[in-house]
Image: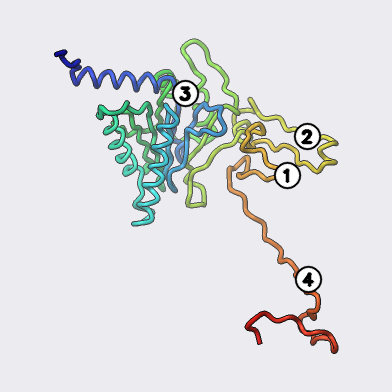
Amino acid sequence: MSMPFYVSPEQLMKDRADFARKGIARGRSVVAVQYADGILFVSENPSQALHKVSEIYDRIAFAAVGRYNEFENLRIAGVRLADMRGYAYDRRDVTGRGLANAYAQTLGTIFSSGGEKPYEVEIFVAEIGDEPADDQLYRLTYDGQVADEHGFAVMGGAADVVAGHLREHYVAGSSLEDTLRVAVAALGHSETEDRVIPAGDLEVAALDRTRTQPRKFLRLRAARLAEILGGRGAPTSDAASPEDALAGAAPHQSGTDDPSDPTDQVSGAVPPLEDPVTGEPPVAPPVAPQRQEPAPGDSPAGEPPTPGSPPPPTEPGQV
């Protein structure tokens, strides 16, 4: 009878941790930085469809690095948990600390379980308050550990190099524009040379407490990024050709979704889902009431029927 293969628990946990760390390091870095009016998230993400930074609730945002399918499942679970708690109790009962604890329990259970591989993800959970001192930023690792970050934090990719550049150039209480420039420069910094990241390859979002809407999450589109970063990688405005003008086609709008995206191929001139600069949802214009034409045999409203005209047809049951 052959003896079963034995691995000590310490070695098993070490192997699982090395496996998760290698998967996370292959992703691009995500930077979370506190500024004067909220928390800013910056990541290099050329994809226009797969987001690494998303909204969870009114004042809570989620950012992740690693395997997309795994952290997308975590994001959806967080949205459902927040919606259920806010509906059953009160919207003020949904907090970033509660979501971070829920994520920590889930990641810790998966990591210690021998039945499945550990999640190759790291997560940011951020919540803004009424004052900068009330802002909260939590970082969760693959094994369920939670760290309370202050100022800035980096995860994924060359996190040590990016964090070192931020440590030298970050200034607390800076404006959104200055903080964005520092974060983008840190993402392009490396030990050998610094590279310029085009605005179209950046995914930038913020929790802005100065917004008048209850929802404080805001995405910065390519047009706004190009304006802040000095126009590098700015999308060129395509003027409408004479053929397009004759056909009634609308010119391409900068800052909208990629025209090559098959999900964006619709007929007719369709306005963008969000404003290309501010990211605000559109406001539907008022609909003018339609005038109904009288049916044959009906007299205009307020006038008696013409003598000798046949009476209007009646429905069954009418008198």
Question: x, y percentage for residue 21?
Answer: 35, 21
Q: Earlier in the sequence, mark 3 or mark 4?
A: 3
- Which of the marked residues, 1 or 2, is nearer the chain's N terminus? 2
Contact between marks 1 and 2 (CB within 8 A): the answer is no
Secondary structure beneath label 3:
loop
Q: Give left or right: position of 147 versus 273.
A: left
In the rendering, at what x and y percent does residue 273 appear? 61, 45
Query: Given this view, does label 4 or label 1 mark the residue nearer the observer?
Result: 4
Q: Which residue is mark 1?
A: 268
Asked if the residues shown at circle 2 and circle 3 are in contact, with their CB atoms under 8 angstroms apart, the answer is: no
Which callout, 1 or 2, points to the residue nearer the camera?
Answer: 1
The quarter of the image holding the N terminus is top left
Residue at the (26%, 19%) spot, across then down: 14
Residue for badge 4: 293
In three-dimensional space, the C-alpha distance between marks 1 and 2, rounded to whole angstroms, equals 17 Å
- For the point 32% across and 26% down, the residue is 117
Between disc 3 and disc 4, the foreground one is 4
Give, as a three-letter code, the residue at label 2.
Ala
